[in-house]
Amino acid sequence: MTSVTNQPMNPIFNGNKLKLGTFCTNTIANMTFVPELLQPTWKNTLAAALIADEAGLEAIVPIARWKGYLDDRPDHQSNAVLDVFTWAAAMAQATKNTCVFATSHAPTMHPILVAKQCATIDAIANGRFALNIVGGWNRREFDMFGINLMEHDQRYVYLEEWLRVLRRLWTDPGEFDEDTRYFHMKKAISRPQPLQKGGIPIMNAALSPVGMRFSAKNSDIGLISPHGNTPEEWQPQVENYKRMAREEFGREIQLWTNVAVVQRETKDAADAYLKRYAEEYLDNELMDSLMKTISKENNIPEGSERLAFMRKRMAVGAGHPMIGTAASLADELERISKIGIDGVILTWPDYVDGLKRFTREVLPILEKRGLRKPFAKTN
Ligand SMILES: Cc1cc2nc3c(=O)[nH]c(=O)nc-3n(C[C@H](O)[C@H](O)[C@H](O)COP(=O)(O)O)c2cc1C
């Protein structure tokens, strides 16, 4: 067991069998113009975070994006993304219980900068901080920085070197030199080091075999989007991932996934709401552009069945669709937990409404089933 970041004070390592969080409230999470869509003002993202925090959800996870998926549309809502590090610092101060994440777009940020930012946020959060690390994929963002988007597998070679330097800055007792392929550093140091001994916990959202191997070796939490429409179809993928971490790297890692939620009193009402935001108000222009990008970057032919499936899925939101009543959502979360998923981060078009419904009606069912302990407020 080489993971050394397992700190009792960070809620992502608490004893709840199924951990929960929000995803993506620092920008729009859905490709829709539905009027109640959360717009990423500080007031709105804070309102969502405070409900999650008060209910004892373990995590609030933002998304790192420098611009949206449309060219030459500066006013398009997908361009509005609050910076993840300053967002996390303010969230750390505003919340009391939850783990606040930031997300690093590693090739755009030097480890010295990230080491110091993270240690500062960890101090503000009193050890309730974690970092999602990503290697990037949207070429538009890299074109803005004037840097190359590396060939796919090379992104993880870079990420591994970047993370090793970052962890050294967080833990090394002295100054150190680095002279590697990507980093040339003399007498490097970053103080203060994080409150969490061994460094900030790391999450990584890889989907490819190379990426998952990186994550098994280096992360505390792998964020996955397994193939298949049911948790039972995911089970072998989840087991293989954890086995790889255990057998190849001697590590126990958590696996989390992301879901898009619609919760209503009846299944018909949930389906009707889904139709409203994912069909009637769908932002087709944004969807077309994103699909073109995905097709080009991943060699998935336009007009293919696979791309059509992805399009339909993405119209629902960021992740596996969970559409139904409080009881059916609790059932599905229980199935997700049973097959070995440790945590789920949730998105809604309207987070405040969604979180209120979810914490009022779904959480108590999960507690009754032993998936979570009733939350004991710290004050
Ligand atoms: C839940 C989730 C969250 C992600 N968050 C980000 C993010 O904040 N910024 C980003 O550029 N990419 C993000 N990604 C993309 C991943 O970093 C990665 O590029 C993608 O999942 C493809 O995996 P691969 O690199 O293994 O092919 C996210 C992916 C998932 C599934």
Image (cartoon, rainbow, N blue to C red):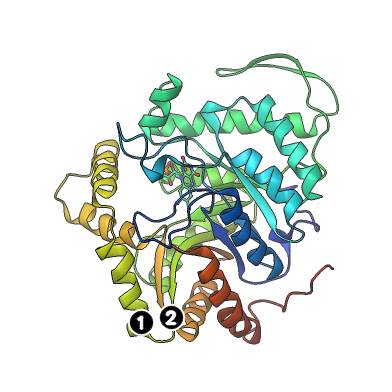
Left or right: where 111 falls relative to 34: right
Q: Would you say the beta carbon of the disc 2 residue lies within 8 angstroms of ligand 1? A: no
Nearer to us in this view, 379 or 337: 379
Q: Is residue 1 visible?
A: no
Secondary structure found at label 2: loop
Q: Quadrant of residue 358?
A: bottom right
For label 1, being within 8 Å of ligand 1 is answered: no
Q: Secondary structure at mark 1?
A: helix
Determine whether 333 is above or below 179 in the image.
Answer: below
Q: Image point 67% across, 27% down: which residue? A: 113
The earlier-in-sequence mark between 2 and 1 is: 2
Cβ atoms under marks 2 and 1 closer than 8 Å: yes
Instruction: Locate the C terminus by quadrant.
Output: bottom right
Residue 21: where, in percent of width, then height? 59, 62
For the residues labelled 2 and 1, the Cα–Cα distance comes to 6 Å
Q: Is residue 34 above or below residue 204?
A: below
Query: Which residue appears at 49% of the width and 83% of the height?
Result: 326
- Residue at which label 1 appears: 269
